[in-house]
Image: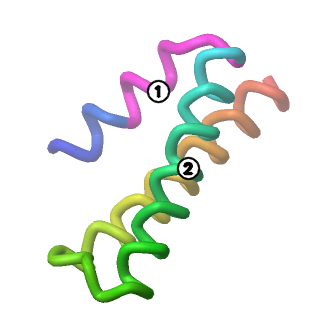
Amino acid sequence: MKINKYVEDLKVKSAAELNEELVAAKKELFNLRFQNATNQLDNTSRIKEVRKNIARIQTVITEKANA
């Protein structure tokens, strides 16, 4: 249910807002990978979660572009 709510929130946003969110998610992923490489990351499952969120954002952007 939590994921469906996140996707529904994404579908309501404009293309510009989606691009901003995509940039923010990619920055977060970079920071998480950096922390993981320096052994400072406690919750390594967060990397997988952020990668999936990036894919969700890109999917919604593609759907809006094709519509």
Percent of width and height locating residue 65: 82, 28
Q: Is residue 5 magenta?
A: no
Is 3 situated left or right of 42 in this image? Answer: right
Q: Which residue is mark 2?
A: 27
Q: Is residue 39 above or below residue 43?
A: below
The residues colored magenta run 7-15
Sequence-first tag of 1 and 2:
1
As displayed, is residue 23 above or below residue 48? above
Q: Position of residue 45 (x, y in %)?
A: 25, 76
Picture residue at 40% right of the left edge, 36% below the top: 7
Nearest the camera: 1 or 35?
A: 35
The answer to the question of whether label 1 and label 2 lie on touching residues, with beta carbons closer than 8 A, is no
Secondary structure of residue under mark 2: helix
In the rendering, at what x and y percent does residue 62 appear? 75, 39
| Badge 1 element | helix
- Kind of residue sitting beneath label 1: Leu
Which residue corresponds to the image point at 41% horizontal and 59% vertical from the top-left?
Answer: 50
The residue under the point 15% across, 44% down is 1
Find residue 21 and report its horizontal and vertical position in percent.
54, 31
| Inter-mark Cα distance, 1 to 2 | 18 Å
- Residue 55 badge: none
Extreme-right residue of the structure? 66
Q: Which residue is mark 1?
A: 10
Dominant secondary structure, magenta = helix
Q: How is the image coloured?
A: rainbow
